[in-house]
Amino acid sequence: MTPDDVAGFFARRQDLDPELYLELDFTFECAGDPREAAAHLCSEQSTAQWRRVGIDEDFRPRFAAKVLDIDAAPRREFSIPVAGVAAVNVHAVRVTLAHPHGNFGPRIPNLLSAVCGEGVFFVPKIPLIRLDDIRFPASYRAAFDGPRFGIAGLREKLGAHGRPIFFGVIKPNIGLPPEPFAALGYQAFLGGLDIAKDDEMLADAPWCPLAARAALLGEAARRAAAETGAAKIYLANITDEVDRLIPLHDEAVAQGAGAVLVNAMPVGLSAVRMLRRHARVPLIAHFPFIASFARLPAYGVHSRVLTRLQRLAGFDAVIMPGFGPRMMTPEAEVLDCIRACLEPMGSILPSLPVPGGSDSAATLESVFRKVGSVDFGFVPGRGVFGHPGGPAAGARSLRQAWDAIAAGVPVSERAAAHPDLAAALKAFGPH
């Protein structure tokens, strides 16, 4: 590119109509001039060739992505060895781009094709790049429904106010037929679980068919609600081929499921948006496949981008990699995803953030302190269903831990008078 060509991909924020553009934050490492690399990044994801040969025209004013801010620092080499690009004049770069959303419209597959596609990850001399954040103007958000229920709707369904919502992943995760599987869920409901859920890998399996499982767990939820006086929800995993999502939703709900789980990225966010228009129960997202985009800090897509998109597509709750070493996700990134669920997005309702990974009564206070509010879901698996006293005792230990936290009493002190909590701290706490 000539210097004039490069300049054509730069703009001042005050000179653009903010309602016509998404804002994108990228970090990348390039070989060569950072400004030229940033201009190539804009070109490749939007206009590419911006005029016809021999014709005096320029498509960039209307169609080009534009650099709003850039910060570059030289470095000796790429942070990750890469083939095919000489490590000469390497720079680490942060840029904010404005991308005209009229290029792709309010269609998630077309959006992702633009901002996460060939035009981003195959820019010459930018072998390492990460989409760190995405922000939508009101004009773009207006085309999306977002969550139907959101946090307030989930709380209303459960009568669960002023505290976290307690989920539990029924274990063993995929190995049981419907009868013993439902029996475990029933016990956990009696102990105080709000939502008993399928594992993300257990869908419509021949040894545990969705219809039979939903019928038994739906009945377990109803019986437990009658016995405890507290509402209960069975969360059924309907992840499958796109053309089966609506039939499986209808079958699960008809049999007694109070919410449905979908693995967001394997199924696709466009499919989720379709399901959102049909569904009459809360939609809960799970995170398979996301780590393959998000794990490396120098490459891919930050998980908060995918969290924002899940909220936009219509998930009422987003289960995400949580705190601690088990999930190998930096604490700051978990908090970024929690904020992406909760922060204002105009008319788009907040989604309940559900950070998970090897949690139990022993980790509840730590998660609560890090989140900084009661607006989160807590989703143990082994911490409930592997409790030495069984699922009812495991669920009771969560509620006992929360009662201590809410009262300002040390959890370990409360455990002295509550054997279920004491057993959880011994089994799952630090040793």
Image (tube, rainbow, N blue to C red):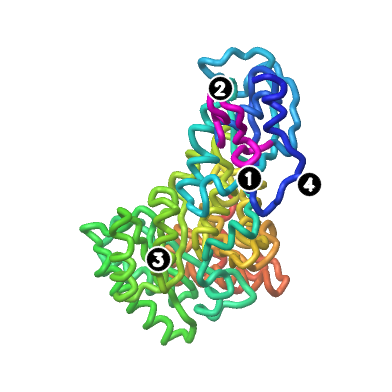
Q: Mark 2 highlights which residue? A: 54
Query: Marks 4 and 1, how far apart in space?
Result: 20 Å
- The magenta-colored residue range is 46-66
Mark 1 = which residue? 133
Q: Quadrant of residue 347 in the image?
A: bottom right
Query: Which labelled disc corresponds to residue 14?
Result: 4
* Residue at figure coordinates x 48%, y 45% from the top left: 290
Nearest to N terminus: mark 4 or mark 3: 4
Q: Which residue is painted at 30% across and 76% down in the image?
A: 254
Q: Residue 297 magenta-drawn?
A: no
Type of the residue with mark 3: Val
Three-letter code for the amino acid on which mark 4 is drawn: Gln
Q: How many marks?
A: 4
On the rendered structure, is 196 left or right of 66?
Answer: left
* In the image, farthest residue toward the left: 206
64 falls in the magenta region: yes
State whether residue 361 appears in this view: no
What secondary structure do most residues of the magenta stretch adopt? loop
**Residue of label 3:** 260
Q: Earlier in the sequence, mark 3 or mark 1?
A: 1
Secondary structure at badge 4 equals helix
Residue 229 seen in render: yes
